[in-house]
Image (tube, grey):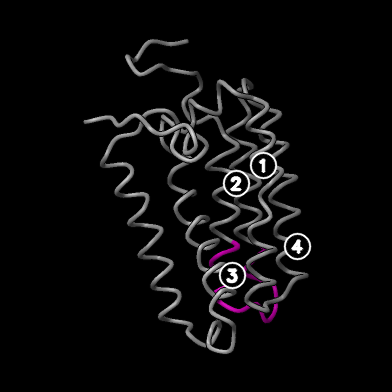
Amino acid sequence: MKQLRIPAFLHDVFGEKQSIGSIAVILLFGGVLTTALYLRFPELTESLPIWRSTLALLLVFDIFSGCLANFTISTSNFYAARKKNRIVFIAIHVHIILGAFLLQQNLAYSIGVWAYTIVGAFVVNALIGHRSQLFVAGILLSVGLGWIPLLPGMHPFLLIICLFFMVKVLFSFAVNHYGKVIDDTGTEK
């Protein structure tokens, strides 16, 4: 499949080279799911200023798109070769809190999901190179998938975003899915 060289400012999103098909699927997924949620729950943005709604929806798009992008070989390899970038990436992910604030949703729930996800991601990240990494990540993801929907009164919009946020950061990103760094020619580094 045709690989594109990704501009340096987008390496953190797509890695250094990415297939056109992967980029299209990632952007389409993020756009379609964000649009579907916006159309299904228009009341969330009706009383908000346009800048606030736009920023919130961009954060939601980033969560959805990033969930898939982090599963690609290119993005995984980019971070596998840059351990410091991986830690910074985990630490800066406050999307769920900012999104809940912008949409005037339950901050306590978003902070709880954020804290669980970030702590879990650091635990999983610390296990890179260990055989148990994928299993521990699976346990932490499963626990989160089990308890988050049990939170009383959570708006379905926020629930969906919280679940994808957790998948994105805790499982899609923190796990080294390919177990090694492979360059563009297929050679292990």
Q: Secondary structure at mark 1?
A: helix
The residue at 46%/26% (across/down) is: 178
Q: Which mark is residue 111?
A: 4
Position of 105 compared to 24: left or right?
right
> Label 3: few (<14), some or many (≥20) within 10 Å?
some
Mark 2 residue type: Val
Q: Which mark is residue 90?
A: 1
Q: Which mark is residue 169?
A: 2
Closer mark to the observer between disc 3 and disc 4:
4
Mark 3 residue type: Leu
> Label 1: few (<14), some or many (≥20) within 10 Å?
some
Residue picked out by circle 3:
159
Closest to the observer, 119 or 84: 84
N-terminal of the pair, mark 3 or mark 4, is: 4
Q: Position of residue 126 (x, y in %)?
A: 71, 29
The residue at 60%/53% (across/down) is: 166
Is 74 within the magenta?
no
Q: Quadrant of the N terminus?
A: top left
Closer mark to the observer between disc 3 and disc 1:
1
**Image quadrant of residue 47?**
bottom right
Q: Secondary structure at mark 2?
A: helix
Using the numbered discs, state the Cα–Cα distance from disc 3 to disc 2 in whole angstroms: 16 Å
CB under 8 Å between discs 3 and 1: no
N-terminal of the pair, mark 3 or mark 2, is: 3
Q: Secondary structure at mark 4?
A: helix
